[in-house]
Image: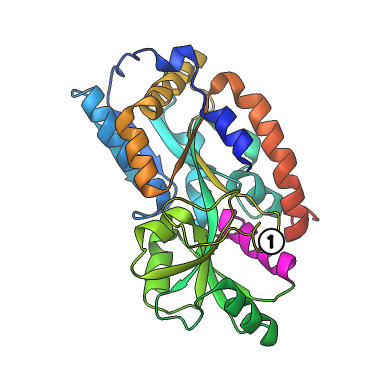
Amino acid sequence: MNRTLIAALALLTTTALQAQPCPEKSLNYWQAFPPGGESDISARHQQMVLKKKCPAIDTVVQYKAGGGGAVMWGSANTLPADGFNIYGINLPHVILQPLEGQVQYKTEDLTPVFWYHYTPDALVVPEASPYKTFAEFLKAAQATPDKFNLGGSALNSANHAAHERMNNAFKIKTTYVPYKGTGDLANAVLGAQIDGALTYTVFAINNKARVRALAVAMNQRHPLLPDVPTFKELGVDWVDGAMRGIAVPKTTPADARKKLSDLFAALNADPEMKELAAKSGFELINVGVDQMDAFMKERARVYGETAKMMGLGKK
C-alpha cells in the first residue's frame, strides 16, 4: 500500500472526532488467531483505551483460532447479531482464502465495519543467523535453491503472499512454513527452528534484540528500523502488508454497525492509541461503514492480482 493511500485513510471524519457515546453493554471481541500476535496486540490496545474512555464497559477478548483465521470466519455468522459481538478480520486473508476453495466461508459472508490499521511486510532472520544483510541472504538463496525454510502466519495470508512475491521478484526458491499465528511463529524464529520469516514490521520491532530485519515493504525506511532497507531500495517496487479490522455477524442492524464504526474511529483518534500504535509499528488507518463497499471492491481488485501470482482461483 502506498503512503498516499495510507495518509488518505488516516484522515478522520468530523463524526469520528466527536466524542462517541460508550456502548450500552460490554463487548465480546473474538480473535481469529492465537494470543501473542499482531491481532491480539491490537485488541489489547483497544481494550485498554476503551476502558479509560468507558470505565463501566469491559472488552472481553476471546479466541477461536485455527485454519489461519478460517475457523473464526467460517462461524462468524453464528454469533449473536446484537452489536456487542465483534470479531477480528484481516486482509488479504479474507479475500485470498476463499479463492483456494478449502474454507467454509466466502468473502461476501463477512461484514467488516471498520479497518483500523496496517502493518508492512518484513523479512527477518534470527539474531544468530549468519546473514547480516539482504544481499547476503539473496546470494545464499540463489546458490542453494530450496535450502531456506521461511515461516509465516497461516496459508493464503499476507505473509504467504509476501513469501511468494519475494520468490518471484528475486528469482529464488524458498519454502514457506505456515504457523497458526504470529505467536506460534515467534517461537520458531526466536528458537532458530527455521531460517527466517516473512512477517511484519511489528514483529521486527517488538523482537529487535532477538531477530534481524533484512528488508521492509515500505516507501521509506521505518523510523524504528532506520538501518533496514526497503525493498524499493533493493530494486523491487514492493509496498504491502496486512490490514486488520473488526466485523460483525451479517444480520447485525445497520445502526449498530454504524455505532461500532464510529466507536473504533474514536479509539483510533485517541492520543494514547496513536502513541501505542507508533511504538509497536502499526500504521493507523480509518475505513468505516460509509466507505466500506468501495474499499472492499478496490482491495478485491488488488488482491486478485496477488491471487494470480499464488495460483489461486484456478479451480
Q: Is residue 200 left or right of residue 166?
A: left
Residue 109 visible in this rendered orientation of the protein: no
Does 197 appear above or below 136?
A: above
What is the x, y in percent for residue 293?
65, 25
Q: Residue at x 50, y 73 (%)?
A: 196
Write the start and end of the magenta stretch as one range. Answer: 154-170
What is the x, y in percent for residue 142?
69, 81
Q: Main secondary structure of the magenta part?
A: helix
Identity, as a three-letter code, of the amino acid under mark 1:
Arg
Residue 242 visible in this rendered orientation of the protein: yes
What is the x, y in percent for residue 151?
52, 69
Numbered disc 1: secondary structure: helix
Q: Is residue 143 magenta?
A: no
What number of labels is visible?
A: 1
Q: Which one is in front, 50 or 95? A: 50
What is the x, y in percent for residue 244?
49, 41
Q: Residue at x 66, y 87 (%)?
A: 144
- Residue behind mark 1: 165
Q: Is residue 162 magenta?
A: yes
Q: Which one is in front, 161 or 73? A: 161
At label 1, counting other C-alpha atoms closer than 10 Å, the crowd grade (few under 14, some 14-19, many 20 or more) is some
Q: Which one is in front, 251 or 239? A: 239
Q: Residue furthest bottom?
A: 144
Q: Residue at x 18, y 22 (%)?
A: 56
Q: Residue furthest left?
A: 55
Q: Is residue 280 left or right of residue 125?
A: left
Q: Is residue 75 left or right of residue 172?
A: left
Q: Residue at x 41, y 32 (%)?
A: 86
The N terminus lies in which quarter of the figure? top right
Q: Quadrant of residue 169?
A: bottom right
